């Protein structure tokens, strides 16, 4: 196997717009910038004997920072909900939680490992999890250090997740999950799961 195939070659999914990311999903850079602006404004205006305007700048900037932090913590965007659903699915598979897998997998869901094997249908996928993850490839512990997500349309979406775990056969992998929902009020259900890269096996 060529060396380059042993390292992850993952094409990233599209990200949301900058405004959405900074105000809703990752507000900390904006919050910290506003805190620094507030302190900087106070220092500059105070050096010019304008303490009161400086305090107003500080209060305004810090109040705005607090507002962005609050909104970011309270509002979950559709993409964040999708990525949370991805963590639920990975946890259900790693824990071999049949009830959760049944809830998150669509009836016709499949796991396709190109060149190896395809498990078609929810019961087949659950059975494979019970046989492999619940048996010789039991997961002692796991983490999901990175998830990418994109909502392609009203009913379809994709996520890509980097998974690390202890236990055989591989300590790290990347997976792509295709999602579907019947309407905006329905939860996302996984339609297809496929590896993008598995340590020791390379890219798929």
Image (tube, rainbow, N blue to C red):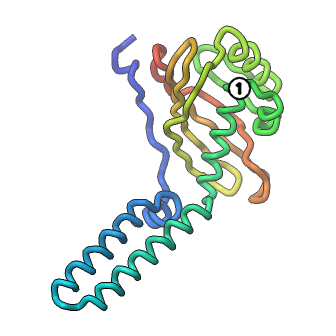
* Identity of the residue drawn at 59% across and 24% down: 141
Q: Which quadrant would residue 140 be assigned to in this image?
A: top right
Outermost left residue: 48
**Residue 114 image offset from top left, x and y in percent:** 59, 20
Could you tell whether 193 is left or right of 109 in the image? left
Q: Is residue 132 left or right of residue 12?
A: right
Where does residue 150 sit, x and y in percent of width and height? 56, 50
Which residue is disc 1 drawn over? Answer: 95
Residue 102's quadrant in the figure? top right
Which residue is located at x 50 percent, y 64 percent? 20
Between 4 and 132, the residue placed more toward the observer is: 132
In this view, the residue in front, 35 or 201, is: 35
Q: Is residue 147 left or right of residue 58?
A: right
Q: Position of residue 33 (x, y in %)?
A: 34, 67
Residue at the far top in the pictured view? 136
Q: Position of residue 136 (x, y in %)?
A: 67, 8
Image-quadrant location for residue 120: top right
Q: Which residue is nearer to you in this view: 152 or 94?
A: 94
Residue shown at 64% from the left, 49% from the top: 82
- How crowded is the residue under tag 1: few (<14 C-alpha within 10 Å), some, or many (20+)? many
**Residue occupying the point 67% across, 44% down:** 85
Q: In which quarter of the image is the N terminus?
A: top left
**How many numbered discs, if any?**
1
């Amino acid at each position: 196997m060529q060396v380059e195939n042993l390292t992850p070659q993952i094409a990233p999914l599209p990200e949301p717009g900058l405004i959405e990311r900074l105000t809703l999903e990752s507000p900390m850079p904006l919050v910290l910038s506003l805190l620094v602006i507030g302190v900087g404004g106070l220092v500059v205006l105070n050096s010019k004997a304008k303490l009161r305007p400086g305090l107003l700048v500080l209060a305004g900037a810090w109040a705005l920072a607090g507002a962005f932090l609050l909104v970011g913590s309270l509002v979950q965007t559709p993409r964040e909900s999708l990525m949370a659903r991805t963590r639920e699915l990975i946890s259900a598979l790693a824990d071999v939680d049949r009830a959760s897998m049944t809830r998150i997998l669509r009836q016709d869901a499949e796991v396709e490992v190109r060149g190896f094997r395809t498990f078609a249908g929810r019961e087949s996928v659950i059975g494979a999890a019970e046989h492999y993850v619940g048996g010789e490839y039991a997961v002692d512990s796991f983490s999901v250090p990175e998830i990418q997500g994109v909502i392609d349309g009203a009913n379809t979406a994709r996520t890509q997740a980097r998974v690390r775990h202890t236990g055989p056969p591989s300590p790290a992998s990347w997976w792509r999950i295709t999602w579907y929902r019947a309407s905006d009020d329905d939860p996302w259900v996984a339609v297809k799961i496929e590896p993008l890269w598995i340590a020791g096996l390379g890219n798929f």
